[in-house]
Each structure stands twice: as structure tokens, then as C-alpha cells.
Amino acid sequence: MRPALDAELERTRKRGYAIDEQENSIGLRCYAVALPYVDPPVDAISVSITLARLSTQRELEVVDLLRQMRGRITRVVNPMGLGAY
């Protein structure tokens, strides 16, 4: 079990985002990106989409939008000093 978890965590690091494949809700896939204003990251943003509305192109769009939002959030949070706990 632990080797499988370690392998999935490594794939997530390389990919740059996490995927929840119907783990919480049947028919939904969730994508998440970490918010890197502290190291290691403790916060993330995510979006869920129904599998019926999902395509490879839509996945790329969703992940790109998450990355854009991560950048916007980080630019606001870091200058305010809110990343330090």
C-alpha cells in the first residue's frame, strides 16, 4: 500500500496537480493545485467536474485555469504576509 501511495505522490509532483478520481463522489473528477506561499504547502485550490462533461481538452483547460488562479492568489497572499502561520 505505501509503495503505491509514494508512486502516486511522485506522479502528482511531476504533473504539478492532483487528481481525485471519483474518490469522494461517483461520476466526479477533482483537480487540485497546491498554493505555494509556505513550504511545504498546506493549502490548495480545486475544482470538480462531472465525467460526462470531461474531455482531454477540457482537463487541460481546467488545470490551466487552476494554475492561473494559483498565481493570482499567491500574488495577493504573499505581499500581505498571510502565508506565514
Image: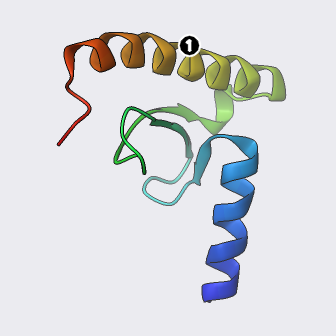
Q: Quadrant of the N terminus?
A: bottom right
Q: How many marks?
A: 1
Question: Which corner quadrant of the image does residue 61 belong to?
Answer: top right
Q: As shown in the figure, which amino acid type bears the numbered disc 1? A: Gln
**Left or right of 65, for residue 57:** right
- Name, please, the residue furthest toward the bottom: 1
Please provide percent x and percent y for residue 70: 48, 21
Q: Quadrant of the C terminus?
A: top left
Please provide percent x and percent y for residue 8: 68, 66
Label 1 crowd (10 A; few <14 / some 14-19 / many >=20): few
Q: Nearer the viewer, residue 84 or 52?
A: 84
| Residue displayed at 20% across by 26% down | 82
| Residue displayed at 50% across by 15% down | 71
The residue labelled by disc 1 is 68
Please provide percent x and percent y for residue 37: 38, 32
Q: Nearer the viewer, residue 40 or 73?
A: 40
What secondary structure is found at the residue carrying circle 1? Answer: helix
**Left or right of 81, for residue 45:** right
| 14 relative to 47, above or below | below
| 43 relative to 40, above or below | above
Please provide percent x and percent y for residue 9: 63, 63
Image coloring type: rainbow
| Residue displayed at 60% across by 87% down | 2
